[in-house]
Amino acid sequence: MAFLLLVVDSSMAFLAQGAMWHAAGEISRAVATGQMTIAEAEAAAASMAGYTASFQQMGDFLVVQLSRPFEGIGTGMILSLVGAMEVQVVQLVEPGVEI
C-alpha cells in the first residue's frame, strides 16, 4: 500500500511541477516585458495554485522563484513530509523595462 501511495504522490508531484514551471515562465516573461508589475505577478502566482513568489533582479536578468508546499499534492501522506516544491526561472529583461 505504501508503494502505491508513493507512486501516486510521485506522479502528482511531476504534474504539479510541470504546471509550476509553466506558471514561473509565464510570470517571468510578463514582468520582464513590462506587461505586469511585481505586485501583480505575486498576486497572480498566489491565485494560480497558492504559489509563493519571490523576485530578484541581477543585472539584466530577472530571477523568479515559485514555491508551494507538498501538502495538497497527491494523497498528501508521503510527500507532505518532504516540505515544499520550488522552481526557479531566469529571464532576460527587455531593454527599457523598469522593474
Image (cartoon, rainbow, N blue to C red):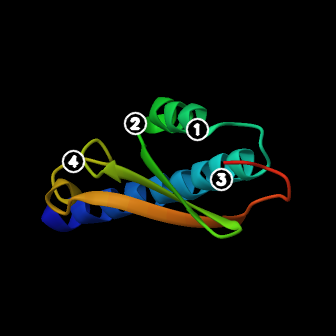
Q: Residue at x 70, y 36 (%)?
A: 36
Sequence order check, earlier mark of 2 and 3: 3
* C-alpha separation, residue under disc 2 versus residue under disc 3: 17 Å
- According to the picture, the residue beneath numbered tag 4 turns out to be 76
Considering the image in quadrants, where does the N terminus appear? bottom left
Q: Kindly identify the amino acid type of the residue bearing the numbered disc 2.
A: Gly
* C-alpha separation, residue under disc 3 versus residue under disc 4: 29 Å
- According to the picture, the residue beneath numbered tag 1 turns out to be 41
In the picture, the disc for residue 69 is none
* C-alpha separation, residue under disc 4 versus residue under disc 1: 28 Å
Count of marks, rendered view:
4
Q: Residue at x 77, y 43 (%)?
A: 34
21, above or below 51, in the image: below
Sequence order check, earlier mark of 4 and 1: 1
- According to the picture, the residue beneath numbered tag 2 turns out to be 50
Front label number (3 vs 4): 3
Report which quarter residue 39 is drawn in.
Answer: top right
What SS does tag 2 mark?
Answer: loop
CB atoms of marks 2 and 3 within 8 Å: no
Q: Kindly identify the amino acid type of the residue bearing the numbered disc 3.
A: Ser
